[in-house]
Image (tube, rainbow, N blue to C red):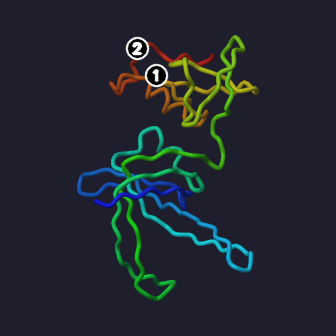
């Protein structure tokens, strides 16, 4: 197998697809290289890679949005397809992702500093993870609540129901025998 590393931006939001009973995440990555020409001007060339990641993407899926910058490593293959735009056969690259890291997103859904009820500040790391806090609620400077799931991941307010469900033991009933995330009344 041939291996490839791609660093680039997602061209569209990632999608979960199902085929032959298997679930995978599909997305495209644009890699732009900039070269200086002999006359001193710059030339940019963008190449596109179609990427697939086995499974549903876990906690990372929600951040695989258009414009997010990622590092992806995996096995690749080249395929030929007909381009309507170029009216010719062109080569395309498919990357079967083995490892992926989110480098940055266009908009942070979670602030980098959150506070507990006593005003103690906690730094939110990349992937929206906070060290030393699990199954609790933290707040931004405006008092907006953010839930921390049982693994330490911080969920934006719009995703609080996901975090609450993630904090369960998977019994589907919302019963959490490890302790509940307490929402403010």
Residue 1 tag number: none
The residue at 60%/46% (across/down) is 104
Asked whether, in this view, residue 4 is left or right of residue 86, the answer is left
- Residue 70 in the image: x percent, y percent? 53, 51
Asked whether, in this view, residue 22 is left or right of residue 80, the answer is left
Q: Do the residues labelled 1 and 2 touch (CB within 8 Å)?
A: yes
Describe the element under mark 1 as helix, strand or loop: loop
Q: In which quarter of the image is residue 129?
A: top right
The residue at 40%/14% (across/down) is 178
- Residue 137 in the image: x percent, y percent? 59, 20
> What is the quadrant of the N terminus in the image?
bottom left
Q: Name the residue under label 2.
A: 178
Q: In this view, does 57 lie above or below 164?
A: below
Work out whether residue 145 or residue 101 is closer to the camera in this orientation and state it: 101
The residue at 72%/24% (across/down) is 143
Q: In this view, does 136 lie above or below 22?
A: above
The mark nearer the N terminus, 1 or 2, is 1
Furthest toward the front, the residue is 38
Q: Mark 1 points at which residue?
A: 150
How many C-alpha atoms fall within 10 Å of the one at disc 2: few (<14), some, or many (≥20)? few
- Residue 33 in the image: x percent, y percent? 59, 66
- Residue 17 in the image: x percent, y percent? 36, 55
Furthest toward the left, the residue is 20
How many C-alpha atoms fall within 10 Å of the one at disc 1: few (<14), some, or many (≥20)? many
Work out whether residue 36 or residue 16 is closer to the camera in this orientation and state it: 36
């Amino acid at each position: 197998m041939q291996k490839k590393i791609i660093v680039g931006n997602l061209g569209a939001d990632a999608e979960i697809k199902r085929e032959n009973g298997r679930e995978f995440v599909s997305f495209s990555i644009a890699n732009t290289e900039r070269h200086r020409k002999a006359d001193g001007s710059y030339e940019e060339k963008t190449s596109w890679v179609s990427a697939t990641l086995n499974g549903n993407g876990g906690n990372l899926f929600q951040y695989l949005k258009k414009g997010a910058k990622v590092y992806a490593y995996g096995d690749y293959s080249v395929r030929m397809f007909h381009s309507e735009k170029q009216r010719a056969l062109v080569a395309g690259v498919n990357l079967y992702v083995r490892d992926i890291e989110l480098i940055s997103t266009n908009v942070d859904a979670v602030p980098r500093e959150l506070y507990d009820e006593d005003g103690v500040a906690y730094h939110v790391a990349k992937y929206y993870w906070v060290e030393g806090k699990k199954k609790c609620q933290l707040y931004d400077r405006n008092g907006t609540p953010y839930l921390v799931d049982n693994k330490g991941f911080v969920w934006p307010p719009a995703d609080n129901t996901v975090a609450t469900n993630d904090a369960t033991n998977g019994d589907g009933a919302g019963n959490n025998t490890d302790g509940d995330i307490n929402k403010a009344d």
